[in-house]
């Protein structure tokens, strides 16, 4: 997903870029494809390639290249894992030496706010997904794991990291290790804040979900610097784990709502009790955001409706 302006998304299906050059490049390409196919087959117990969930862009856009992402749940840290072409890893070795298994259903957001870029994908049964990202050896891309989508018995070694995407051999490997003793290890022990973002015009219009919008949560009255930006899915939803946030309120910031933008409509609810939570729109030093009161227990859902920009469909 390439966002030329904040909140605007364009999509395309996965497209493999042909390597240029002579016979040596062709042989390297064939070997790379063979190695990746074997890796996928071993993980799935099948000779077929897995379906790949991906954020996509227009096929005619030459400014992006596929960036594969592999997420593993391991009993011990295997170190750096790179699923990029030509750098495949042995699933059998990882399983035998480190107890690694593919982590399905984990969402990952890749972004760079300086160039208004954000992309999200969700891993398949092989722990693989891909995004289309702009290659640039001089520009770092932030890699943010949606911790709410990780098995509660595990935790990412690096929930917020970075990478450089410059060739088709680039890739992102994410390792989850067993959660530390004393941390929530069951889904019902974690507190989640889910945000749904949509556009709508008029009092009686139907809300239309906004995919690919970046959102961020942080403890109220505390700087949001260093907090992850996570992208919404096709239904306009994104979830945050907020169990560790301290204080009586949580701030929800949207990258699409810049300075001077119309105030969105919003409502937040405690999903366990059905009670509407106190929420207010705040113009802060770091941007505008929704500040919602944080209950001691219960998951939270905030529905945010943005004013559709003039001329939008």
Image (cartoon, helix red, strand yellow):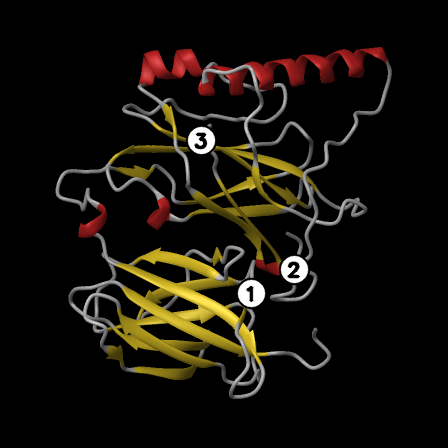
Report the residue marked by disc 2.
9
The reply to whether dot 3 and dot 1 touch (C-beta < 8 Å) is no
Q: Residue furthest left?
A: 182
Which of the two labelled residues, at mark 2 and mark 1, occupies the earlier sequence position? 2
For image coordinates 40% across by 24% down, the residue present is: 79
Which of the two labelled residues, at mark 2 and mark 3, occupies the earlier sequence position? 2
Image: 173 above or below 257: above
Image: 269 above or below 113: below
For image coordinates 45% across by 19% down, the residue present is: 43
Q: Secondary structure at mark 2?
A: loop
Q: Is residue 239 left or right of residue 186?
A: right
**Residue 227 visible in the shown view:** no
Which of the two labelled residues, at mark 3 and mark 1, occupies the earlier sequence position? 3
In this view, the mark in front (2 or 3): 3
The reply to whether dot 2 and dot 1 touch (C-beta < 8 Å) is yes
Report the residue marked by disc 1.
210
Q: Is residue 213 left or right of residue 168?
A: left
Image: 10 above or below 29: below
Q: Residue furthest bottom?
A: 203
The answer to which quarter of the image holds residue 296 is bottom left
Residue 170 location, x and y as percent?
A: 61, 31
How far separated are the C-alphas under marks 2 and 3? Answer: 26 Å
Compare residues 272 and 179 and report the one nearer the observer: 272
For image coordinates 32% across by 18% down, the residue present is: 98
Compare residues 209 and 238 and report the one nearer the observer: 209
Mark 3 Cα within 10 Å, few/some/many (few <14, many 20+)?
A: some
Which label was assigned to residue 125? Answer: 3
How far separated are the C-alphas under marks 2 and 1? Answer: 9 Å
Name the quadrant of the C terminus: bottom right
């Amino acid at each position: 997903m390439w966002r030329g302006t904040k909140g605007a998304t364009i999509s395309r299906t996965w497209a493999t870029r042909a390597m240029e050059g002579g016979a040596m490049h062709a042989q390297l390409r064939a070997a790379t494809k063979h190695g990746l196919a074997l890796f996928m087959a071993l993980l799935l117990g099948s000779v077929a390639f897995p379906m790949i969930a991906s954020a996509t862009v227009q096929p005619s856009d030459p400014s992006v290249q596929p960036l594969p992402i592999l997420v593993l749940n391991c009993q011990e840290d295997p170190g750096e894992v790179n699923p990029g072409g030509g750098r495949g890893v042995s699933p059998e070795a990882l399983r035998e030496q480190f107890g690694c298994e593919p982590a399905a259903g984990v969402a990952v957001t890749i972004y760079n706010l300086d160039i208004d870029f954000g992309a999200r994908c969700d891993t398949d049964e092989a722990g693989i997904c891909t995004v289309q990202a702009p290659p640039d050896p001089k520009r770092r891309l932030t890699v943010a794991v949606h911790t709410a989508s990780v098995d509660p018995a595990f935790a990412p070694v690096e929930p917020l990291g970075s990478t450089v995407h410059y060739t088709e051999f680039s890739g992102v490997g994410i390792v989850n290790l067993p959660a530390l003793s004393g941390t929530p290890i069951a889904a019902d022990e974690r507190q989640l804040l889910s945000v749904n973002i949509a556009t709508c015009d008029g009092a009686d219009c139907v809300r239309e979900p906004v995919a690919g919008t970046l959102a961020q949560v942080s403890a109220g009255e505390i700087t949001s610097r260093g907090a992850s930006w996570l992208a919404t899915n096709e239904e306009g939803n994104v979830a945050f784990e907020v169990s560790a946030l301290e204080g009586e309120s949580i701030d929800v910031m949207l990258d699409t709502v810049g300075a001077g933008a119309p105030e969105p409509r919003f409502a937040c609810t405690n999903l366990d009790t059905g009670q509407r939570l106190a929420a207010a729109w705040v113009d802060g030093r770091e941007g505008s955001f929704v500040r919602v009161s944080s209950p001691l227990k219960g998951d939270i859902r905030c529905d945010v409706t943005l004013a559709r920009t003039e001329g939008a469909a």
